C-alpha cells in the first residue's frame, strides 16, 4: 500500500510539473465538417453599382453558392446589352463599358449554378457622370423687387414697401420686416431698421441696419453615387443692393483649375482632397460681397451618403469639407458641420465670411505634415573653427547679365584625435541588443464580460509553469501529511 501511494504521488507531481507542455491554447480548436443534404434556393444579395464614371460602371453582388455572373443593361427596361462571366463564384463583379455620359441606365443581374439553380434581381437603375467641370444646373437670382424702393435719409438707407404691388407674404415684428416668397429666386427677405412706420398701403423702414436674403434651393441630379444634391445660401448684407443679377451654377466635379485650387486650400490646412463631388459657382457677386454683413454667407449643401461612404476615409462624415476659391485667388477650407440626414442624403453647413465665390463639396484625408528644416550639423569633436571669411566672385552665368556671388569659407584646425564609432557600427549594436531582448507580452483588454475568457486564458498561458509547480508542491505537502498520519497503520 505504501509503495502504491508513493508511485501515484510521483506520477501526479510529474504531470503537474509538465502540464505546460501539454496545455493547448483555446484558439487552437478543432474543425468539423457539416453536411447539408438537399437543394437550397440560390439567392442574389448585396447588389450595387460602384465606381460609376462618365463611360463605365461596375455592378457587384453576392450569391449564397457558386454561380456564374450576368448583367443585362440598357437605357430602357428591355435592356439589349449583356455582359457576363462564366467563372463560378460567390462574389460577382461585372464591368459595364462604353456607356454614354450623363445617361440613366436600367440593369438586372442573373446568376446560375452548375446544377441549374438561378436567381434574378428586379430592375435597377444607375446614372453615369458628366465630364468633370460640366454645368448640370443653373439659376439666376435678382435683387430688384416690385414694390420695393430705396433712398438715403440722413446718411442711412431707407426702404419703402408698397403693399399693393409687393410680392410675397409680409410680417412685421418690432423693427424687423420679413417677406416670405418675394420672388426673383429668394424664399425669404428680412429687413432690420431702427424704426418701422405704416401709412395705409406703405411701410417705411428707416435707418437700415441689415438685410438677410435666403435663396431658393437649387437642385441637380449629378448621377453616380453623388445623387440629387440641394444647394442653398443665406446672405447677410449691411443694406439692400438693388439691380444685381447673380448667376448660380452647379457643376459636376470640378474643372482642372478649380480642383488644383481646392487641393492647395486643403494642403494649407494639412489635408489632402481625395475627391470633389461637385462645385457651386456664383457669378456677378462683386456688389454683394462689398456690402457683406458680419454673418457673411451661409451655405447648406447636400450629397448622397453613398458618395460619403465611397470617398471619405472610413466613410466618416467629418471628412467632408466645403472649400472656397475666390476671384482674387483666395483658397480656404471652410469650417464644415454635418447637420443631419434625410433618407440617404447627408446635409452639411459652412459659413463663408468673405462672401460668394466658387465652393466645392469634397472628401479629405489627413495630409503629410510639412517636415521641419534639417538641423544644423553639429561640430565635429576635436576641431576649432576660425572666423568666417567672405569673398566675392564675378559673373555667375545667370540670365540677365553678370551677378555677384558670395563665397563663404570656414577653415578648421585639427586639435586632437577622438575615436568615433561609425553609424553603421552603432546601429548594428542596437539591433543585436534588441534581438537579445524578446518583446514582452501584454494582456488583452478587459472591457466587459465577453473579454473574461481571453484574459483568463492569457493568465493561464503566462503562469502555467508557476501553477504546475505550486500544484505539485501542494500535492507533495498533502502527501507528506497523509504519510505521517498513516505511517502507524502501514507499520
Image (cartoon, rainbow, N blue to C red):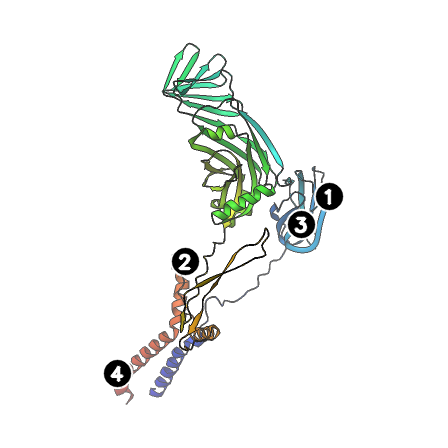
Q: Is residue 389 above or below residue 232?
A: below
Q: Is residue 142 above or below residue 65?
A: above
- Where does residue 363 sit, x and y in percent of width and height? 52, 45
Q: Nearer the viewer, residue 266 or 52?
A: 266
Task: Please tell me how crowded label 3 is: few (under 14), some (14-19), or many (20+) other residues with Cα within 10 Å.
Answer: some
Report the mark closest to the observer, 3 or 2.
3
- Residue, disc 4: 485
The quarter holding residue 434 reads bottom left
Q: Nearer the viewer, residue 372 or 68?
A: 372
- Residue, disc 3: 94
- Where does residue 43 sit, x and y in percent of width and height? 62, 49
Report if residue 34 is visible in the image.
yes
Q: Residue at x 26, y 83 (%)?
A: 485
Q: Residue at x 38, y 60 (%)?
A: 446
Q: Is residue 367 left or right of residue 110?
A: left
**For marks 2 and 1 on the same chain, the one whose residue lies earlier in the sequence:** 1
Q: Is residue 294 above or below residue 332?
A: above
- Residue, disc 1: 81
- Where does residue 378 sit, x and y in percent of width and height? 42, 67
**For marks 3 and 2 on the same chain, the one whose residue lies earlier in the sequence:** 3
Q: Which mark is residue 143?
A: none
- Asked if disc 3 and disc 2 are in contact, CB closer than 8 Å, the reply is no
Q: Nearer the viewer, residue 16 or 130?
A: 130
**For marks 2 and 4 on the same chain, the one whose residue lies earlier in the sequence:** 2
Dot 4 falls on a residue whose secondary structure is helix
Q: Residue at x 48, y 17 (%)?
A: 148
Amino acid at each position: 500500500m505504501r509503495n502504491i501511494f508513493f508511485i501515484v504521488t510521483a506520477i501526479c507531481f510529474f504531470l503537474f510539473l509538465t502540464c505546460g507542455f501539454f496545455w493547448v491554447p483555446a484558439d487552437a480548436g478543432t474543425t468539423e465538417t457539416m453536411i447539408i443534404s438537399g437543394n437550397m434556393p440560390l439567392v442574389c444579395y448585396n447588389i450595387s453599382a460602384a465606381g460609376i464614371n462618365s463611360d463605365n460602371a461596375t455592378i457587384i453582388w453576392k450569391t449564397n453558392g457558386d454561380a456564374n455572373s450576368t448583367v443585362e443593361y440598357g437605357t430602357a427596361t428591355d435592356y439589349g446589352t449583356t455582359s457576363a462571366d462564366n467563372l463560378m463564384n460567390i462574389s460577382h463583379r461585372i464591368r459595364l463599358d462604353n456607356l454614354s455620359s450623363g445617361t440613366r441606365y436600367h440593369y438586372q443581374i442573373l446568376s446560375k449554378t452548375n446544377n441549374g439553380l438561378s436567381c434574378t434581381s428586379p430592375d435597377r437603375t444607375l446614372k453615369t457622370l458628366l465630364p468633370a467641370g460640366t454645368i448640370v444646373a443653373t439659376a439666376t437670382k435678382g435683387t430688384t423687387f416690385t414694390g420695393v424702393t430705396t433712398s438715403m435719409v440722413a446718411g442711412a438707407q431707407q426702404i419703402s414697401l408698397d403693399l399693393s404691388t409687393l410680392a410675397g407674404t409680409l410680417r412685421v415684428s418690432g423693427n424687423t420686416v420679413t417677406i416670405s416668397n418675394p420672388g426673383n429666386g429668394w424664399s425669404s427677405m428680412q429687413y432690420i431698421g431702427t424704426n418701422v412706420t405704416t401709412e395705409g398701403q406703405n411701410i417705411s423702414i428707416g435707418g437700415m441696419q441689415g438685410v438677410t436674403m435666403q435663396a431658393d434651393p437649387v437642385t441637380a441630379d449629378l448621377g453616380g453615387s453623388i445623387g440629387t444634391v440641394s444647394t442653398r445660401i443665406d446672405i447677410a448684407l449691411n443694406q439692400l443692393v438693388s439691380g444685381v443679377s447673380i448667376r448660380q451654377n452647379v457643376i459636376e466635379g470640378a474643372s482642372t483649375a478649380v480642383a488644383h485650387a481646392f487641393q492647395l486650400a486643403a494642403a494649407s490646412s494639412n489635408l489632402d482632397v481625395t475627391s470633389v463631388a461637385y462645385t457651386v459657382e456664383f457669378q456677378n457677386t462683386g456688389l454683394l460681397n462689398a456690402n457683406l454683413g458680419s454673418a457673411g454667407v451661409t451655405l447648406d449643401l447636400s450629397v448622397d451618403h453613398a458618395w460619403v461612404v465611397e470617398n471619405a476615409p472610413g466613410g466618416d462624415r467629418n471628412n467632408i469639407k466645403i472649400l472656397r476659391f475666390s476671384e482674387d485667388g483666395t483658397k480656404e477650407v471652410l469650417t464644415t458641420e454635418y447637420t443631419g440626414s434625410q433618407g440617404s442624403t447627408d446635409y452639411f453647413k459652412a459659413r463663408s465670411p468673405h462672401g460668394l465665390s466658387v465652393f466645392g463639396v469634397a472628401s479629405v484625408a489627413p495630409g503629410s505634415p510639412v517636415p521641419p528644416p534639417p538641423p544644423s550639423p553639429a561640430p565635429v569633436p576635436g576641431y576649432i573653427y576660425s572666423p568666417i571669411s567672405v569673398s566675392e566672385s564675378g559673373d555667375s552665368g545667370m540670365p540677365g547679365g553678370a551677378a555677384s556671388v558670395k563665397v563663404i569659407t570656414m577653415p578648421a584646425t585639427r586639435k586632437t584625435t577622438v575615436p568615433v564609432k561609425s553609424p553603421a557600427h552603432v546601429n548594428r549594436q542596437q539591433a543585436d541588443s534588441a534581438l537579445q531582448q524578446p518583446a514582452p507580452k501584454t494582456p488583452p483588454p478587459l472591457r466587459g464580460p465577453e473579454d473574461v475568457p481571453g484574459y483568463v486564458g492569457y493568465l493561464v498561458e503566462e503562469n502555467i509553469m508557476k501553477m504546475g509547480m505550486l500544484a505539485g508542491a501542494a500535492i507533495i505537502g498533502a502527501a507528506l501529511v497523509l504519510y505521517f498520519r498513516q505511517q502507524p497503520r502501514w507499520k
